[in-house]
Image: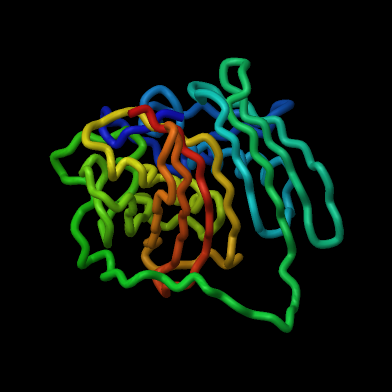
């Protein structure tokens, strides 16, 4: 799904909670119409497509355990009315696998695979994903300067630059460290708003761009590391770093921590670049 941080703002905005509430599950298959203010150009961005797939899945199959892992393939543009085909692939005693196909204008736009699993007692506890040093969000400068025009969906988030560099800066190190939160306060802690937020930052390869150019996420795989999904004041610390950029593609790693610096989500993305 092509993305660039520069785009067109929209004065009319739809709250994230309103967008979720508009998802219709009464018909044969869930559907939703995404308003212009949630688009990046002519399509929804990958994180919103992922979040809507998860919302459709959980509405179709209520009572699923917490989300543990997910994989997404972003196949084509998703715009206007989106339709979701949800299939329960397997359900065991503690885990369930569900597949979701997202269609737009009759064409397949995205395919998602979710793994849900009940937590269970274990003798083991280990984590090796320490958060990088970062000042609190109130001590960080704006990630997007107030005068800069941005892609429509970016207006729904608060952004602070905690480390690394901005997109299109030509910096040698393609990494960004950001505090990000939904502008809409009071969203309940769940994986749906977290997925929409976790993929909101632009791909890290954009840091090395000397000028604006298209970029497109191809695949996204993620693992949920803490089922509570709790943080303070809605803020999440996100580090995204491109580990390779060659032959028109980039491979990047992403990690999300809460305000207590506890790791909550680990992910990888494959990105196509056109420069």
Residue for point 42% across, 38% down: 246
Is 11 located above or below residue 114 in the figure?
A: above
Q: Is residue 170 left or right of residue 182?
A: left
Q: Residue furthest bottom?
A: 123
Residue for point 73% across, 49% down: 62
Quadrant of the frame with the C terminus = top left
The x, y position of residue 34, in whole percent, is 47, 29
Q: Is residue 23 left or right of residue 139?
A: right
Q: Residue furthest left?
A: 147
The x, y position of residue 13, in whole percent, is 34, 35
Using the rendered image of the protein, determine whether residue 19 is visible from the camera's viewpoint.
Answer: no
Is 244 located above or below residue 214 in the figure?
A: below
The x, y position of residue 193, in whole percent, is 49, 50
Residue for point 56% across, 54% down: 191
Q: Quadrant of residue 25?
A: top right
Using the rendered image of the protein, determine whether residue 48 is visible from the camera's viewpoint.
Answer: yes
Residue for point 76% across, 48% down: 97
Q: Residue furthest front?
A: 247
The type of colouring in the image is rainbow
Q: Is residue 180 left or right of residue 191?
A: left
Q: Quadrant of residue 146?
A: top left
Residue placed most toward the observer, 129 or 196: 129
Is 125 located above or below residue 98 in the figure?
A: below
Is 218 located above or below residue 120 in the figure?
A: above
Q: Is residue 194 left or right of residue 96?
A: left
The x, y position of residue 272, in whole percent, is 45, 33
The number of callouts visible is 0
């Amino acid at each position: 799904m092509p993305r660039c941080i520069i785009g067109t703002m929209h004065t009319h905005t739809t709250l994230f909670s309103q967008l979720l509430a508009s998802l219709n599950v009464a018909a044969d298959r869930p559907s939703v119409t995404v308003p212009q203010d949630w688009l990046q150009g002519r399509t929804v961005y990958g994180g919103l497509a992922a979040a809507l797939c998860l919302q459709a899945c959980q509405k179709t199959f209520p009572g699923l355990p917490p989300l543990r892992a997910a994989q997404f393939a972003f196949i084509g543009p998703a715009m206007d009315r989106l339709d979701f085909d949800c299939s329960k692939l397997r359900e065991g005693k503690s885990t369930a696998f569900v597949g979701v196909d997202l269609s737009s204008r009759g064409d397949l736009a995205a395919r998602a695979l979710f793994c849900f699993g009940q937590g269970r007692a274990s003798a083991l506890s280990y984590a090796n994903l320490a958060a990088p040093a970062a000042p609190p969000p109130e001590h960080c400068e704006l990630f997007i300067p107030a005068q800069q025009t941005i892609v429509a969906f970016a207006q729904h988030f608060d952004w602070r630059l905690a480390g690394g560099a901005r997109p299109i800066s030509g910096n040698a190190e393609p990494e960004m460290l950001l505090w990000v939160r939904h502008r809409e306060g009071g969203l309940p802690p769940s994986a749906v708003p977290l997925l929409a937020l976790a993929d909101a930052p632009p791909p890290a390869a954009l840091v090395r761009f000397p000028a604006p150019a298209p970029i497109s996420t191809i695949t996204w795989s993620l693992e949920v590391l803490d089922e509570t999904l709790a943080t303070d004041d809605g803020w999440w610390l996100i580090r995204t770093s491109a580990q390779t950029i060659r032959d028109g593609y980039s491979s990047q790693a992403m990690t999300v921590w809460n305000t207590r610096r506890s790791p909550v989500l680990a992910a990888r993305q494959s990105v196509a670049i056109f420069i």
